[in-house]
Image (tube, rainbow, N blue to C red):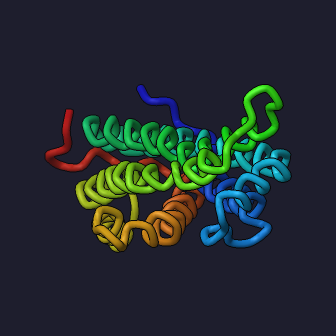
Amino acid sequence: MNERPARWESLAGAGAVLAWLVAVLIVEGSGDRGDETAAELLAYFENEEGSLYIGALIFFIGSALIIWFGSVLRTRIAASRLDRLAAIAFGSAVALAVTSTGLIVPQLGAALAAGESDTPLSEEAAQALWYAGDGFIIASAVFAASLAVTVGLATLRSRLLPTWLGWLSLVVALALIIPYVQWAAIFFAFPIWILLVTIFLWQHSNAAWAEPAIGAET
């Protein structure tokens, strides 16, 4: 039998979004550095090691909370005997947690390397590390889409979430895999989706769980 999550665990998704937002505000607090030269980026890493360390730590906490969020979803989906979808949802959340950390790990590594006197960071390396995390946006978007589409399908096959949110989950998942759109989906649409799902999980955390849907997996 699946263990029913405590009510406060239903807030893991909102906690993840909040942690990510705070981390981004800390890391990006000095403004956009996309047009700065390699020398200016190196100076940034040398001067902002503390801010990057704190921001990265908070960001990692947010990613860890996504795993918790996925665990709550897995239990809720499994309650409707949709075991395969439950496993995919949790696996997608774990994969998303791992790839999302890649968005900031290169910058943290650059800041730590810039402070090393024995092997100082070069300007070219600083510039490369600044953009190294961009590839993880695409990877994170794919796993976020996997999570959203799984929740959407589970909702349409059971009473996990309101039907409208199930269809919205599929729309968000589609946006997450469309080139030139996925960057906006991962940074805006997906966090809003997490908050909507979290609100429903919180409101119904003490209610009776869904009965298995007809034709559900066993």
* 131 lies left or right of 74: right
Q: In the rendering, at what x and y percent does residue 120 appear?
A: 75, 35
Q: Quadrant of residue 80?
A: top left
Q: In the rendering, at what x and y percent does residue 13 appear?
A: 58, 53
The quadrant of the picture occupied by the C terminus is top left
Vertical placement of 188 versus 45: above or below? Answer: below
The quadrant of the picture occupied by the N terminus is top left
* Frontmost residue, 1 versus 43: 43
**Can residue 61 be spotted in the picture?**
no
Q: In the rendering, at what x and y percent does residue 35 appear?
A: 61, 72
* Marker count (numbered): 0
Q: In the rendering, at what x and y percent does residue 58 appear?
A: 73, 47
* 149 lies left or right of 217: right
Identify the residue shown where x is 40% and y is 61%: 161
Vertical placement of 165 versus 59: above or below? Answer: below
* 64 lies left or right of 189: right
Identify the residue shown where x is 30% and y is 57%: 149
**Can residue 182 be spotted in the picture?**
yes
Identify the residue shown where x is 28% and y is 35%: 83
* Frontmost residue, 70 versus 184: 184
* 65 lies left or right of 73: right
* Frontmost residue, 130 versus 117: 117
Identify the residue shown where x is 65% and y is 56%: 20
Vertical placement of 197 versus 56: above or below? Answer: below
